[in-house]
Image (cartoon, grey):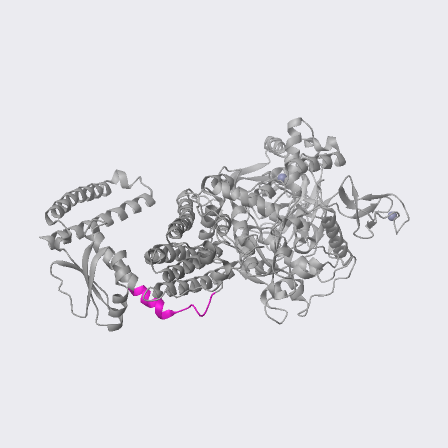
Amino acid sequence: MPLEIPKAYEPQEIEERWAQAWFDEKLFRAENSGTSGNPSKRFSIALPPPNVTGSIHIGHMLEHTQIDMLVRWHRMRGERTLWLPGMDHAGIATQFVVERMLDKEGIKRQELGREEFEKRVWKWKAESGGQIKQQMIRLGASCDWTREKFTLEPALYRAVLEAFLRLYKEGLIYRGRYMVNWCPRCQTAISDLEVVHNERTGNLWYLRYPILGAPANGPQYIVVATTRPETMLGDTAVAVHPDDERYRGLIGKNIALPLTKREIPIIADAAVDREFGTGAVKITPAHDPNDFEMGKRHNLPQIDVMTDTAHMNENAGAYAGLERFAARGRILKDLEEQSLIEKITEHTHSVGTCDRCKSIVEPRVSTQWFMRMKPLAEDAYKTVTGGFGGAAEIEVVPDNQRTILLQWFENIRDWCISRQLWWGHRIPIWHCAACSEMVPAEDSQVEIVDGHARAASVPEKCPKCGSAKLVQDKDVLDTWFSSALWPYSTLGWPDDTEDLRTYYPTSLLISGYDILFFWDARMIMMGLHLSGAAGEGAADPPVTVANAAARIPFRRLYLHSLVRTAEGAKMSKTKGTGVNPLELTQKFGTDALRYMLASMAAPGTDIILSEDRILGARAFANKIWNAARFLFLNLEKAQAASGFTLEELAAPAIRAKAPYDTGGATNLVHKWMFSRLSSVVHETSKAFNEFRFHEACRHMYQFFWGDFCDWYIEWVKPELSSTDRNAAVAAWRNIFALLDASIRLLHPVMPFLTEELWHRLPQPEAAKSIALDAFPEPAPAWTNAEIEKDMAVLQEIITAARNIRSEMKVDQKKKVAADFSSKDARLRSLVEQSLEPITRLATLSELKVSAERLDPAGAAVRSTADFDLRIAYGDAIDKGAEIAKIDRETERLTKDIESKRARLADESFTSKAPAKVLDGFRATLAAREVELEKLIERRKQLS
Ligand SMILES: [Zn+2]
Ligand SMILES: [Zn+2]
């Protein structure tokens, strides 16, 4: 085995090679990890399925890094570990992409027809979909790709049909004419969650509606205020509050609705807000959710005045055919001409837009499919609160998200699950053309046509009237309906499969808090309700304390932070603030980017990207590489001198027996290092388990860079080339055992770099990858509080000496003499035993140890409660040259401080500079002032 490690750490080459090898070897098949026998030693997690249209963005990268760290950690702990990947067909998003492509060819999807359009989408998916999978493989996500799923593949199509049919038969899915959010661009209903509300400044138009039979001495009009005047064509009443004195006499009278030939009543309803506008409101039941409810209370007709594309329809009379905003203009003009506009005011109100295409959503009455959520939400609520009587079945982290989730369950509303799209799971209901009876598919079986699934058990005759004229419902299901089944549909449900029995419930879900309602909450509700009965057409038994724990989709739910731009906005490609993680990995390496994201991923705090942070992470990766390289270079030298073999020093069986006794005083530092390893393994594991990834990173960083590289390796260096062969062998064995443990510790966060280094060490014959090796275990036998304390004092002494040297500006290589004094005999003996490393690491010519108090004259002294350390000025420094140097620096600093003070006194600067810049400026000035004080102090000591 070549010992040499290339000089430069070049992540691109290493990462591409290992990513491909892991994938080709199917290394992350669940069966390659642990054994399935012990249920408490299983870890399963489903990948939140990215849109098949998508490519990786920094948000995915953050999410996948956190999942991958935990997956690798669990796998290394010997658990049977499954990370199940897959893609979402993303109904509306995918249809949108393909429609835009067709637009460029000048084709409308309606011209192609449903079947041809679907073919186009499949073709597009085959060519351009799945990009994200290739990117995930390249980024080293340790998914079991042999189990990859797609929401529209036959098995999952069947699961969707099964879920729909069960819920339909139970009466939890119903069809009806209700108010929905309608997107005129996408030409489909969308759910409340898919509507983005923006505050906009618009107008409030006050319209005069002529009162029929108004007394000549009274008002001739009732004035109503509206933000959407075009909907007045669909008005079917004007409502006032029953206690409103202003209008009491008008209740029951009729109005001649302007621009139409209709008469509509003035009605009284306590829901009217007397404070809004004039206190009289126009009621348009077909175009406003509140009016819809009021219309039902008063049996008002619903007049829909628009088409699917938000043009005015035949109910709009003379305005038919006009686009809604063009109609608005025309209507206002016509009302103006008839003097029917009382006034126009400015008005800020919330406007709903389509999350997908940004069109203004039209509230509109429409016949849709809905799901009754309340009964499901009640059970779901209990699993989060322990409401079934036992402990909570689902743990939600962080706690504020748990509260938000519970509020959502409490205020749940029915879910509009139908979409007027062509790309998705088609609703398995047939309508009888003769009697309108709705006939469900007989079962959830699917057939494959042109390689794609569709419902197979098509009903032949209407059970009510016997007609054979049955037409399948045109709608497809909301994409989130299929993703709500994801944790078990991917494991083979409704069949009773081995995977379902082994990996369900999954251990954990990690998702962004932005899809808590869209996805996580719905998975809990659907999972609880449906997963209890495997087998086609099985009846869903009620959720009970006995079965709830087996039916939840995941035991823990962690809502991670989002990545934001420096200005705090959510990263977005369309806004041009999206950072392409692949560009960053090309530049800095995937391991560095992963480390950076993990080190900032504190629960509840959004992450702000900066290149400095990535550079810091890259420096850490370099440090790991260089430390390993340094050891191998020195081993080569030692081998030449003493004839060691790498096997003799670092074979797995040799490493397993560490730590080795090196004899004498140096044993202290070896024991200390193993004690530190044990603590850091414990701390890191604890942090992983609590989703405190930033703390895990900090522990690893301080351990590897601080303890291992800066202290331990430096301390034991002479031993590595010691002429005492036994001491050298023992030291080398310890160092390799520690290097091996360190890279295993670091593996979950930096998989590529550690895989590369792991292969440089001797490994068991059949061992394929560090990913299947063990995570280090805390060893109680290594933990030694006394030794950690002793080392801490020795480090303090060395640090004190270094600080004095640097303050005195002693040449870095120049050795100076120092005195050490302590009343503690044990401490004195400890220092005496470690004189060699102390003097070497602090660059001292000698260190005199005594119990006497030290004379501070002519020397710099550092004192702690336990000891004093003194370095005499003596000949260590050239006093004259030093004084001259100090004077020069004093002059420079004084000038610098003066100019900075002047700058801060200048209002034309301070009034314009951002607060951040000013704060930084003041901090620098304060630091300079302290530096100057110290210089003056030293100048006094020298003269
Ligand atoms: Zn839209
Ligand atoms: Zn019929």
Q: Looking at the image, is 115 positioned above or below residue 835?
A: above
Magenta run includes residue 780: yes
Q: Looking at the image, is 223 positioned above or below residue 764?
A: above
Query: Horizontal and vertical percent for residue 616?
Result: 39, 47
Q: Looking at the image, is 910 positioned above or below residue 548?
A: above
Can you name the residue that lies furthest to the left here? 943
Q: Total marks drawn? A: 0
Query: Horizontal and vertical percent for residue 802?
Result: 24, 55
Question: Do we see residue 305 in this rendering?
Answer: yes
Magenta run includes residue 373: no
Question: Do we see residue 275 in this rendering?
Answer: no
Query: Horizontal and vertical percent for residue 901?
Result: 21, 44
Which one is in front, 657 or 938? 657
Query: Horizontal and vertical percent for residue 243?
Result: 60, 55
Which one is in front, 490 or 592? 592
Residue sitting at 28 percent across and 62 percent down? 796
Tell me: 701 left or right of 866. right
Which one is in front, 111 or 320? 111
Can you name the residue that lies furthest to the top here? 106
Which one is in front, 354 or 476? 476
Tell me: 110 left or right of 561. right
Q: What segment is highlighted magenta in the picture?
A: 778-793
Tell me: 918 left or right of 760. left
Can you name the residue that lies furthest to the right here? 466
